[in-house]
Image: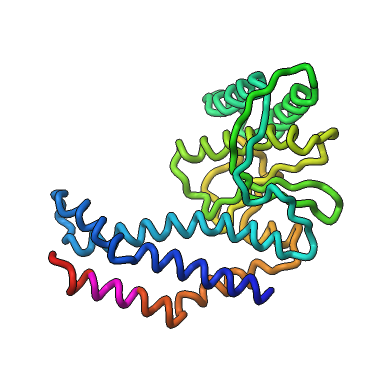
Amino acid sequence: MNEEVQIVVREAVLKIIQDTASQKNIRDHLKKHRVKIHFVPLRYRIIGAILQSLNIRFGNFIEKLIALVIEQDSQVSSLPESGKRISLSMTAETDRLIDQYITSRQLPNSPDLCDDAYQKLLEAIFEIERRTDRSKQTITKDVDALFRSRDGKIIYLEAKYNDDHDTGKFVDINRKFLKTYAGLLNHLQIDALDQLIPIIYYFNPTKRYGPIYIPSSNILRGAQLFDAFLEFSYADIDTILRNLGDDEKVMEIFDRLYQIIRHDLDI
């Protein structure tokens, strides 16, 4: 594994832990939970809240980590928009079409497999957006990762830590994924449907949801992304993150956190 990636991963994780376990953050949670009636002791509610916050921030970090790995990998070429929030454009017609597609896939009589419906949607979006006589609206979206693969295809990646979102959040992820794809068609001036491949990637391989909105061919999990496109190994990333749990600096932060909550707070 590239040493620069290892250093960046360690420093970023340490910063997340330090910020989350800061005395200010602890006291903010104390103020919030002190006024709540609950049978769980206050100090344990604070610990739980901090760990939950840490888990959320780590999930956001994984999205940035994937962009970093792609930027450093010699087998692909990261594009300038990768890992950034950018302005895109798309027609109001495509916007409505995507909303209609998402709604239709939630109906009881929708087919279990979405491959055909999804392909027809992408073809319709492409035909609508390639017409220069259509007025377009501006949208601002996060592009988690965007890179050119060895075969010359451009891969747009929507990266998530885990496939465990609640129903509403899961719908939002898929809707945002499709609208960002539509905007990228214009931004990158794509002139053939197979030039831009949209993929949803889950860092953890565990599968919760079936292919409701996006077919399995456009969903990668765990090592699949690395095996398909990258020189870096998923196992190396996994080892770095697991070893951080035994890192002396990490243990020191958590030990101090426990002491603050156990002894130093006025609970």
Residue at 53% across, 28% down: 106
Query: Compared with residue 45, is residue 89 higher up or lower down, i.e. above or below?
Result: above
Q: Quadrant of the N terminus?
A: bottom right
Residue 193 within the magenta-colored segment of the rendering: no
Query: Compared with residue 207, is residue 99 higher up or lower down, i.e. above or below?
Result: above
Query: Compared with residue 255, is residue 56 higher up or lower down, i.e. above or below?
Result: above
- Looking at the rendering, the stretch of residues picked out in magenta corresponds to 254-260
* Figure disc tally: 0
The image shows residue 251 at horizontal and vertical percentages of 39, 78
The chief SS type of the magenta part is helix
Residue at 46% across, 80% down: 247
Query: Compared with residue 42, is residue 153 higher up or lower down, i.e. above or below?
Result: above
Res 113 visible: no
Residue at 43% across, 82% down: 248
Looking at the picture, tell me which residue is in the foreground, 35 or 110.
35
Q: Quadrant of the C terminus?
A: bottom left
The image shows residue 261 at horizontal and vertical percentages of 22, 69
Residue at 58% across, 36% down: 176
The image shows residue 69 at horizontal and vertical percentages of 66, 63
Q: Quadrant of residue 205?
A: bottom right
Specify how the rendered protein is coloured: rainbow
Q: Quadrant of residue 229?
A: bottom right
Left or right of 178: which side holds 30? left
Res 81 visible: yes
The image shows residue 5 at horizontal and vertical percentages of 63, 70
Left or right of 189: which side holds 225? left
Name the outermost residue toward the top: 133
